[in-house]
Image (cartoon, rainbow, N blue to C red):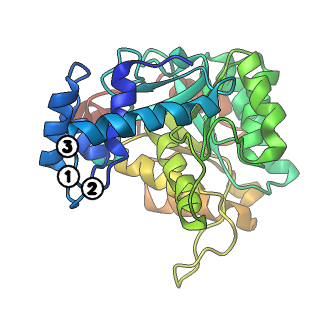
Amino acid sequence: MKYTDNAINVLTAISFRGIGRASIVKGFTGGDTVEDIVHKLCKYSKKAETITLDNFLMRKSEILNKLQSLEGFADGVVAIGDKDFPPLRGTVKQGDRPVFLFYRGDLSLLNITNNIVAVIGLRNPDRDIENIEREVVSELVKKGAIILSGLALGCDSIAHKQALTSAGKTVAILPSPLNDIVPRQNRELSDEIVKKGGLLISEYYIEAKSKLEGDGRYQERDRLQALFSDCIILSASYSKDENGSLQKNDSGSRLAMGYAVEYLIPRAVIYDEEISKDNPKFDLNRKIIDEYKETIIINRKNLSEKIKLISSLKPLPDKQLDEQLTLMF
């Protein structure tokens, strides 16, 4: 498994209580000595845990031992400060930025020069939703887009599979370590993604210590779907009721679309009023359309036009991105 000393230092640093992603983003340049790192950690730490050179090196050795469990499952790990660490899209606050990624497959797919489009949705799509999503993904691949999703059952799986069927490349972001593919039903799909030139990435190398932590990893996965995409497309999903409770399982789509707003990532939804107005599986799509006039709406009548637009989107600085969204509508 490939990694730099910098990557292991980042993994070690963030393992200390009181050290979060924002501290790593502010403090790591990729060329720090261990002594410099320990000094910075003592400065940034918000907890009482003592960080010394000796216990940093001991923790680093322990992490190297833990990484042995990923041999054969991960090609490597990259961290902030490494030359191969992938760039982010949009505007992402320090605390939300990933600081390391475990990967298997072609990491260069996340290069800023590639057009990456996330396609997400619920876990129980009906046949109509599946068909239109396949058409959208097929057209995106024809335009050279790389399809990104979360490897979940339902719409995520459809996006990955259609990308492969269309001879395209696809990226799967996991809420679990690479040696424990979730869901298990998609282990063969994950292998096929890599075999056909795609990519798997994860922020995890050990199992979650509790159900609460495990559930939180799905939300963290949703944020990565947004910040690595030039546009995020919602196939279909349920929304919330008046009391703020989810009517149905929305499979994280609502969170991912929310992160896209926060990061200034363009959003699109698949929706045809004539066909889908009474289908509750499009409730979130309708809600987004009603609340955000900038939303790109995709249906069979405008498929070619909207896919061409989405395929032309490129990462831009904050002000330019705002101007681009304004000019688009």
Looking at the image, do the residues carrying marks 3 and 1 touch, with CB atoms under 8 Å apart? yes
Direction right: furthest residue: 127
Q: Residue type at mark 3?
A: Leu
Pointer 3 or 2: first along the chain: 2
Direction bottom: furthest residue: 243
User: In screen coordinates, is 153 left or right of 117?
Assistant: right
Tag shown at residue 225: none
Nearer the observer, 73 or 120 = 73
In the figure, 244 relative to 60: above or below? below
**Residue at (42% x, 23% y) in the render:** 86
Quadrant that contains the N terminus: top right
Where is mark 1, residue-wise? 45
Pointer 2 or 1: first along the chain: 2
Residue 44, x across and y down, in percent: 16, 48
Where is mark 3, residue-wise? 41
Nearer the observer, 223 or 326 = 223
Q: Residue type at mark 1?
A: Ser
Looking at the image, do the residues carrying marks 3 and 2 touch, with CB atoms under 8 Å apart? no
In the figure, 96 relative to 160: above or below? below
Where is mark 2, residue-wise? 18
Nearer the observer, 70 or 312 = 70
- At label 2, counting other C-alpha atoms closer than 10 Å, the crowd grade (few under 14, some 14-19, many 20 or more) is some
Quadrant that contains the C terminus: top left
Residue 319, x across and y down, in percent: 22, 35
Residue 322 visible? The answer is no
Q: Residue type at mark 2?
A: Gly
